[in-house]
């Protein structure tokens, strides 16, 4: 009986120890499970956040691509507009230049018409006296092909265009200056103060050069070239003369023959009875 009591005590002690150990293990398992659950929740949250970040990054990438394409498109539009603006500026400059040229020609023609009208009005009833006529002096000039004639109250001196100019241009031949200044010297000797018209005439053939669009322009250019020689190389004054281009409107011979066309190509120095102011 005395031996069995210690054995029972040991058994009870072991039972108590096992009970305590079991309780401790149960508590540790519960804590561990709680930690695992928390880690799983954090992992799910991080995965969700990572997905959101990837989605946002993809959205930003799309926006970047769209903006890059838009910038390229805008740059192309800017270049097109710059090219168009440059073209418009060039066209504007060309149009302005043409308009200025046309206005200048218009003013020149208006001035010529005004001078011619005034001259014709003043010459009514005025006759050049025979003892002052150039017809008595010009035959002494030894220049082949120079013709003079009365035309109402004026005297016309014909200078063949073929002797003055290269065909169809206002470019002088080699002897053109000498012909013009020699005739001018005789005019100044007899009529130093008379009003003088420099008239250009052509044949009926169309203009064959891009420089002139009509025979009116060609005849005016040729008459203007003669006028420049008279002003720069003789004592004739600018206010003494005016320039007119008639084109082929006033032929003196038929245009049906080559010889007639040649005679019609001419520059006439026309002496009016009224004096220059």
Image (spheres, rainbow, N blue to C red):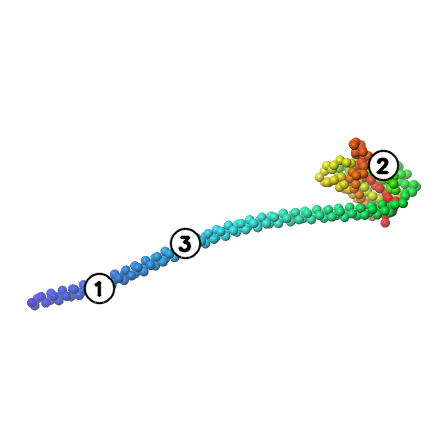
Tell me the residue at 82%/38% (across/down): 159
- The numbered mark at residue 147 is 2
First-in-chain label (3 vs 1): 1
Q: Quadrant of residue 187?
A: top right
Tell me the residue at 79%/32% (across/down): 256
First-in-chain label (1 vs 2): 1
In the displayed structure, 21 sits above or below 262; it is below
- The numbered mark at residue 54 is 3
- Estimate the x, y position of residue 108 in percent, counting from the top left: 77, 47
Identify the image quadrant of the N terminus. bottom left
Tell me the residue at 75%/46% (across/down): 105
Q: Which residue is mark 1?
A: 23
Q: Quadrant of residue 53?
A: bottom left
Q: Secondary structure at mark 3?
A: helix
Q: Are marks 3 and 1 in contact (CB under 8 Å)?
A: no
- Estimate the x, y position of residue 113 in percent, counting from the top left: 80, 46
Q: Are marks 3 and 2 in contact (CB under 8 Å)?
A: no
- The numbered mark at residue 33 is none
Q: CA distance from mark 1 to mark 2?
A: 149 Å
Q: Secondary structure at mark 1?
A: helix
The answer to whether residue 40 is left or right of residue 275 is left
Q: Dot 1 surroundings within 10 Å: few (below 14), some, or many (20 or more)?
A: few
First-in-chain label (3 vs 2): 3
Q: Is residue 91 visible to us here?
A: yes
Q: CA distance from mark 3 to mark 1?
A: 47 Å
- Estimate the x, y position of residue 61 in percent, counting from the top left: 45, 52
Quick one: which residue is furthest to the right in this view? Answer: 131
Name the residue nearer the viewer: 275 or 175. 275
């Amino acid at each position: 009986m005395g031996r069995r009591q210690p054995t029972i005590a040991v058994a009870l002690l072991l039972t108590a120890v096992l009970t305590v150990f079991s309780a401790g293990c149960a508590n540790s398992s519960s804590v561990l499970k709680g930690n695992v659950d928390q880690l799983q929740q954090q992992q799910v949250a991080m995965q969700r956040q990572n997905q959101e970040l990837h989605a946002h990054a993809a959205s930003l990438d799309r926006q970047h691509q769209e903006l890059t394409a838009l910038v390229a498109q805008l740059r192309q539009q800017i270049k097109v507009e710059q090219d168009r603006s440059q073209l418009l500026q060039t066209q504007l400059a060309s149009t302005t230049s043409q308009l200025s040229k046309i206005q200048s020609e218009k003013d020149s023609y208006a001035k010529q018409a005004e001078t011619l009208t005034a001259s014709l009005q003043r010459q009514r009833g005025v006759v050049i006296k025979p003892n002052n006529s150039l017809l008595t002096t010009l035959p002494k000039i030894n220049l082949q092909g120079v013709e003079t004639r009365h035309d109402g109250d004026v005297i016309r001196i014909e200078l063949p265009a073929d002797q003055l100019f290269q065909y169809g241009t206002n470019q002088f031949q080699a002897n053109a200056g000498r012909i013009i200044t020699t005739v001018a010297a005789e005019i100044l000797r007899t009529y130093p103060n008379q009003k003088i018209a420099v008239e250009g005439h052509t044949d009926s053939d169309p203009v064959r050069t891009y420089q002139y669009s009509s025979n009116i322009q060609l005849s005016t250019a040729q008459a203007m070239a003669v006028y420049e020689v008279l002003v720069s190389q003789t004592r004739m004054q600018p206010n003494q003369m005016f320039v007119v281009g008639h084109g082929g409107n006033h032929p003196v011979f038929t245009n049906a023959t080559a010889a007639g066309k040649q005679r019609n190509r001419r520059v006439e120095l026309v002496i009016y009875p009224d004096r220059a102011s």
